[in-house]
Image: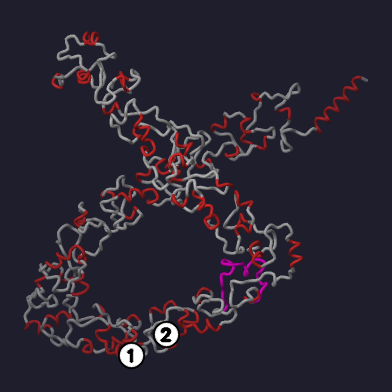
Amino acid sequence: MRRLSFIIVLLALSLSLVAQKSPHGDSFKTSCADCHKTNSWKVDWKGIDFDHKTTKFPLEGQHQVVACKECHTSLEFAKAQPECNSCHTDIHEQTVGNECARCHTPNSWVVTNITQIHQQSRFPLIGPHTVADCRDCHKNLLSTSSPATPTASLLRFDPLGVDCYDCHKQDYTAAKEPDHIAGNYSTNCTDCHNINSFSWDGAGINHNFFPLEGGHDINDCKTCHTSGSYSKIPAECVTCHQTDYNSTVNPNHSSLNFSTECKDCHSLSPGWKPAEYRDHDSRSFPIYSGEHSGEWESCSDCHKNPANYAQFTCTDCHEHNKTDMDDEHGGVSGYAYNSTACFACHPTGNGEGSFDHNKSGFPLTGAHTTTSCADCHTSGYAGTPNTCAGCHTNNYNQTVNPNHNIAGIPTECADCHTTNPGWKPATYPTHSNLAGAHIPIANDCAACHKGSYTTLPKLCNDCHSNDYTQTNNPSHTAAQFPVTCADCHTQSGWTPATFNHDGEYFPIYSGKHNGEWNNCSDCHQNPANYAQFTCITCHEHNKPDTDEEHSGVNGYEYNSAACFACHPTGSGEGSFDHNQSGFPLTGAHTTTACSDCHTSGYAGTSNVCASCHSNNYNQTANPNHTAAGISTECADCHTTNPGWKPATYPAHSNLLGAHLPIANDCAACHNGNYTTLPKFCNDCHSSDYNQTNNPSHSAAQFPTTCADCHTQTAWTPATFNHDGQYFPIYSGKHNGEWDACSDCHQNSSNFSFFTCTTSCHPQNSTNGDHDGVNGYQYLSSACLECHPDGSEGKKMNPNNFRRNQ
């Protein structure tokens, strides 16, 4: 009977345990016996063999040695989130996102590949930027070796500008050779400077816009920049070499009207030689190729008249004589024994065959193939023009549809005509952009020009002003539509026409209003003002029903402007969500009544701080924003928190240490004066400087640049480069052997006076230490002379010893 009772109790207890809810959550499926024993709930963690790899968060690096409770703060293990910021405070304050793994690893917080990480940013580090201190650009970073103990994290990486000028404005304004401001130089430093250079001097100038090669490879900028201005000078050769051009006499460049583009004949090698007129082969006669290559020495071999290089001779160069040439050319039509005739039949210098126009600089096509030679070569074969106007000036002058002269059409016939007979078909190049309905009339000049070719139509409205004024659905003139027809119409036809109503105003071609209207007047019932629209007349609404539907909706009004304000996309569901607009509400704005900002309706409300808060700005007295010239961009210093506090001043972001507690206490430094701003330590700390007596800074004429010795944390401890400039007291044997400056400098009015021979080095013991030392004297100056670094091992060099007389 007892055994049966025990079994019943045990079964009841078991059922109770089964019914009890697990403290580890409903989703925890592990058996209790895997961790717990029957005699106690206490867990022997060393005896548990749990593989964390079976979860969504395998343990790596430092996570392998972290106590479970550090992450699993409750008994429901599934509540521990895998995101870094669920356990780790974001010390970067949302300036670099939540993905810690972009920079850190589970092994350490130390970032060892900063440069590589930066390559993925908007500003990859190259050149001197690869070795720059992060704090040079990220001004709000604290050095880990700084003695300051900040009260808040300053490890923010706020986005910075990526233009050179954002960081180097001071370098730009300080530059005087040349003066960048006076010269209105580009603020894009890479226009002139090489981003890989470690200095701003001339060695780093980016001269890629005019490569300095050959004879231009000079180190004296003033050779070309003769005016003292380093702005870009013209790249044309003649800009610098006009004198060289004018003074050249063999041949005389100016009289022969040679091109001033020096590179046509000359290379960039120092000096003008060797020079070659390579265009001679293509423009005149092949002398660098063909049978005449290497058969001449100077220009004067063929051009006997140095004053006129249009003259040339063939018969003087070859061992020709008229009798032999006459025999060789017997029966050749047009043969004459003169140089121009030679060139006419042999323009390539080839002695065989007759002249082939297709191999000349003017191949014959179209109507030219049937034209008599004499029609073009009216004055012989030399100098015949190869331009259209050279032969067709009369045709140009006599054309009346259109009148080429009056219309100012170019005389380059090939721009519009081919060589086909009759000058047709003809095209006008500027009409190549015509399409659709304009194509059939593209070459019907009178259709658009109507006889006037001086005032050329350029805009749609030049031809279609009547179409614009006569349109009444909608009336373009009443609605003051722009006359840029292409905004809505294509060249194919006036319809269908489009207008970006969805993107600029309200979705009528998409969403719930698509297909729910017939013409513009459905909503715009005032044809004289399309800025007016109606919502409440289009829908089957009435005020009582609409009022009831919007009961409790903050800012509701029964008018079309209010409809649009709350339903800018035309959706009938929900009310206006300011967080999805261009002005999300935060801080004090969340409790502000709509009418406080939307004083003149909901359209056109400014999102600029000063639009609503100019009175706050003008009435602020500590500091007086107007007198101090503080920016009206409130967000530069304030958040949207009520009461305008806390407020920061961006220019104070470089303050550290003892300055931090007063960074936003304007009066502490400015004392009511915000026009003359303190910039240097001594502007605020002149009293500290004057009152310091150990040592007396004023008597010792110490510089007023406090940062040379002091930090922003406190005046002490202070450092001074005593070791490097005078005598080692922070290193060597004297390190730690003194308490104050006055131990050695006992004359507070003259710190050039010092003593070694007082209580520090008594005379009796010092004399004994120097027995047999030649030239020894018990004088402080002698001590320094023999022991300039304070070491006992140094012995005096008598040649360097200066006795005190």
- Using residue 113 as the reference point, say whether residue 544 is left or right of it: right
Q: Identify the residue at horizontal 57%, vertical 49% (top origin).
A: 640
Asked which secondary structure carries label 2, the reply is loop
Query: Which is nearer the eye, 689 or 263?
Result: 689
Where's residue 562, x and y in %? 66, 64
- Write down the quadrant of residue 524 in the picture: bottom right
Where's residue 458, x and y in %? 42, 79
> How busy is the neighbourhood of tag 1: few (under 14 within 10 Å), some, or many (20 plus)?
few
Above or below for 741 versus 663: above
Which segment did they paint magenta? 495-518
Query: Which is nearer the eye, 287 or 603?
Result: 603
Residue 730 appears in the picture as rendered: yes
Where's residue 420, x and y in %? 34, 86
Write down the residue under mark 1: 399
Write down the residue under mark 2: 443
Above or below for 437 versus 19: below
Q: Identify the residue at horizontal 48%, vertical 36% (top origin).
A: 661
Asked which secondary structure carries label 1, the reply is loop
Decide whether the magenta segment is chiefly helix, strand or loop.
loop
What is the CA distance from the residue labelled 2 to the residue labelled 1?
A: 15 Å
Query: Which kind of residue does numbered mark 1 sit on?
Result: Thr
